[in-house]
Amino acid sequence: MTTYFKDIYDGVATALIGMRVTLGHLFKKNVTIQYPDVKHDIPERVRNRLYVNMDDCIGCDQCAKACPVNCITIETAKALPDEELGETSTGNRKRLWVTQFDIDIGKCCYCGLCVYPCPTYCIFMTPSFEFTEYNREDLIYHFATLTPEEAAEKKANAERHKAEQAAKKQAALAAKKKAEEKKQAEEAAKAGGADSPDESKKAEGNDTPDEEKNTD
Ligand code: SF4
Ligand code: SF4
């Protein structure tokens, strides 16, 4: 009988000892969080996922040049003279269509070196640090806002304009050369024309005495 009550006592006491630890945590500050629903605050100057505000990008390529692992790929096309691209929020005039702006975040080492040279402050680190993907290709972020068709059109326009400008330049050079040749020819002709009367005079001067001599 004594053993029976002792076992009951031990059972209750053991449960209470276990519960003491559990109940104690009800009144302590949590050390775990319900990730991903709850997240820790991140440091102010943290290096995370990059973002590019394409409204302010002028396609200057400074960020790509600064990247030590070449994970930024930028392609641009010059805007035509009658195309107005507007200005960035920092007042820089936009002259280039950014036809491609890719960041391969799988290669990025989060050094932040691309952020500092940007003249319009449009490439920056965001608080986002979760970007796992099943496919590596999905780690290449495409920021350009033009569709592939629009990008192809802008590139073709820029190439055509460049060719036209080169042709105009060639034509201008050819015209200039022709004008110079014509001028030289005219100067040579003038010089030749100036020589002829003297020679004829000389010829006349030489002939006259002989004729006079013959007459006499
Ligand atoms: S953070 Fe560094 S490695 Fe990543 S894109 Fe910028 S410059 Fe390149
Ligand atoms: S440095 Fe800035 S403005 Fe220049 S291409 Fe990079 S993101 Fe665009």
Image (cartoon, rainbow, N blue to C red):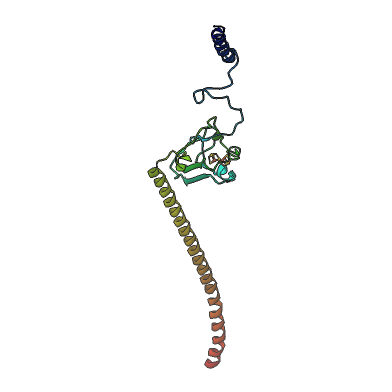
At a point 50% along the width and 63% down the height, the residue shown is 177
Q: Is residue 132 visible?
A: yes
Vertical arrangement, residue 113 with respect to residue 13, above or below: below
Location of the N terminus by quadrant is top right
Give the image quarter of residue 46. Answer: top right
Please state the horizontal and vertical placement of residue 140, each as a whole percent of the image: 48, 41
From the viewer's side, name the closer residue of 82 and 159.
159
Residue nearest the viewer, comparing 195 with 84 = 84
Q: How many marks?
A: 0
* Residue 26 visible to an observer of this rendering: no
Query: In which quadrant of the rendered image does the C terminus lie?
Result: bottom right
Farthest left residue?
A: 149
Q: Residue at x 57, y 46 (%)?
A: 69
At horizontal 40% and vertical 47% (from top left) the residue drawn is 152
The percent coordinates of residue 86 (x first, y second) are: 48, 36
Question: Horizontally, is 27 left or right of 97 in the view?
Answer: right
Q: Ligand 1 is in which quadrant of the figure?
A: top right
Work out whether 61 lies above or below 185: above
Up-down relation of residue 35 to residue 59 (above or below): above
Front-most of residues 94 and 6: 6
Q: Position of residue 67 (x, y in %)?
A: 58, 44
Residue shown at the point (57%, 82%) measured from the top left: 202
State the residue in front, 48 or 183: 48
> Where 186 sits versus 141, above or below?
below
